């Protein structure tokens, strides 16, 4: 497919390859791209916009960040609610499911999203992002129930993210390859820039908050030491690259190879959760990375096989190049 086609053209072309396609993805993804354009403009002006409280402030506090998150959340909800293809939504920002307004038609799909991740980095101009995934409703009833939403990542029908950095980019998959589109601001369209993205089998970088090293389980410390230890045969040492913005670190590793690690938050990795949320952060990017030839694991289980217990469940994650993730699994499971 020729570079430079719009994301809508790309989605329509892929839709023709599916005899039973209804056009729902085309509509949903098109509205998500509109939301991303609006959010991207707001993000680009965040440090100049008085209504967010940034101008003239000596420090940027949590309240200011939350205003932008709330704006992104509302923008996505408002753009997709009217499509007629959604049964309900779930956002990292909201405690409960988000219903479709009674006046709007409903469909069979569920949108799960993180409206704006990595937001605390925005005042120092590190890239932030929106993560999304789409599930198909399980039941046939008229009420939105959690069993419709609490599905493992292997049941996803689409997933992706928007990254707002030096340029605004969309990366998505519907289960047949991963494709990237860069926003051309002069015409206001996302144009195909990265077709059939494939993550390298192994990388040269690792991403982890190494400041927490002495609070990590010994096996996780062993993983860090492995990637830091020189070994010409295996291409080590790896270089540490960590921004604290999950989308930014993931995007770099997706294109160049490497592993992002956010382990369990206590000394016992089998009895503790991580920081990142399974449904709105980890599963969507696990779906993307697997479609690009990569891997995602809790250290003990494939992320896409994890059965969610509740909407905001957190899990440890090792995600990226398959050889690097496999090595992390072997170390944390005591196989090395």
Image: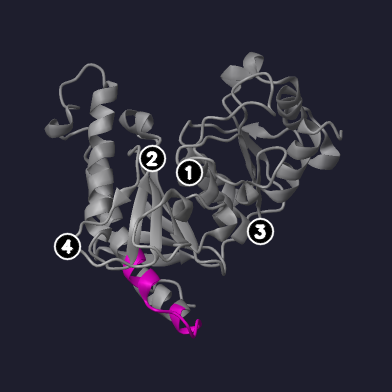
Q: Earlier in the sequence, mark 2 or mark 1?
A: 2
Q: Which residue is mark 2?
A: 92
* Residue identifier under label 1: 281
Gap in Å between the C-alphas at discs 2 and 1? 8 Å
SS at circle 2:
loop
User: Which residue is the site of mark 3?
Assistant: 293
Total numbered circles: 4
Mark 4 to mark 2 CA distance (whole Å): 25 Å
Q: Residue at x 55, y 56 (%)?
A: 288
Disc 4 residue crowd, few under 14, some 14–19, many 20+, Cα 10 Å: few
Q: Position of residue 253 (x, y in %)?
A: 58, 46
Residue tagged 4: 103
Q: Disc 2, disc 1: CB below 8 Å? A: yes
Is 315 or 192 nearer to us in this picture?
A: 315
Name the N-terminal-most of marks 4 and 2. 2
Give the answer, above or below, for where 53 lies relative to 99: above
Magenta residues span 15-29
Q: Nearer the viewer, residue 159 or 183?
A: 159
Residue at the (76%, 31%) spot, across then down: 332
């Amino acid at each position: 497919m020729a570079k430079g086609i719009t994301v809508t053209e790309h989605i329509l072309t892929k839709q023709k390859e599916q005899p039973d396609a209804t056009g729902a993805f085309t509509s949903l993804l098109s509205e998500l791209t509109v939301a991303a354009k609006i959010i991207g403009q707001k993000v680009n002006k965040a440090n100049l916009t008085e209504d967010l409280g940034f101008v003239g402030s000596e420090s940027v506090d949590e309240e200011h960040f939350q205003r932008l998150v709330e704006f992104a959340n509302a923008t996505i909800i408002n753009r997709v609610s009217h499509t007629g293809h959604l049964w309900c939504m779930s956002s990292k920002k909201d405690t409960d499911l988000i219903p479709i307004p009674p006046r709007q038609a409903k469909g069979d799909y569920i949108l799960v999203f993180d409206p704006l991740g990595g937001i605390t980095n925005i005042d120092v101009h590190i890239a932030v992002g929106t993560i999304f995934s789409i599930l198909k409703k399980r039941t046939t009833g008229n009420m939105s129930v959690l069993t419709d939403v609490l599905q493992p990542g292997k049941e996803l029908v689409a997933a992706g993210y928007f990254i707002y950095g030096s340029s605004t980019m969309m990366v998505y998959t519907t289960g047949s390859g991963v494709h990237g589109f860069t926003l051309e601001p002069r015409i206001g369209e996302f144009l195909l820039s990265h077709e059939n993205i494939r993550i390298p089998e192994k990388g040269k970088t690792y991403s982890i908050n190494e400041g927490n090293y002495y609070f990590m389980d010994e096996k996780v410390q062993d993983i860090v030491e492995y990637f830091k230890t020189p070994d010409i045969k295996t291409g080590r040492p790896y270089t540490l690259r960590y921004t604290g913005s999950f989308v930014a670190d993931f995007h770099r590793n997706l294109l160049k190879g490497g592993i992002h690690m956010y382990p369990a938050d206590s000394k016992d990795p089998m009895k503790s959760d991580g920081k990142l949320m399974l449904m709105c952060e980890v599963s969507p990017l696990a779906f993307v990375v697997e479609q690009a030839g990569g891997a995602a694991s809790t250290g003990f289980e494939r992320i896409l096989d994890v059965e969610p217990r509740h909407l905001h469940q957190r899990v440890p994650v090792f995600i990226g190049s398959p050889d690097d993730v496999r090595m992390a699994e072997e170390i944390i499971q005591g196989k090395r």
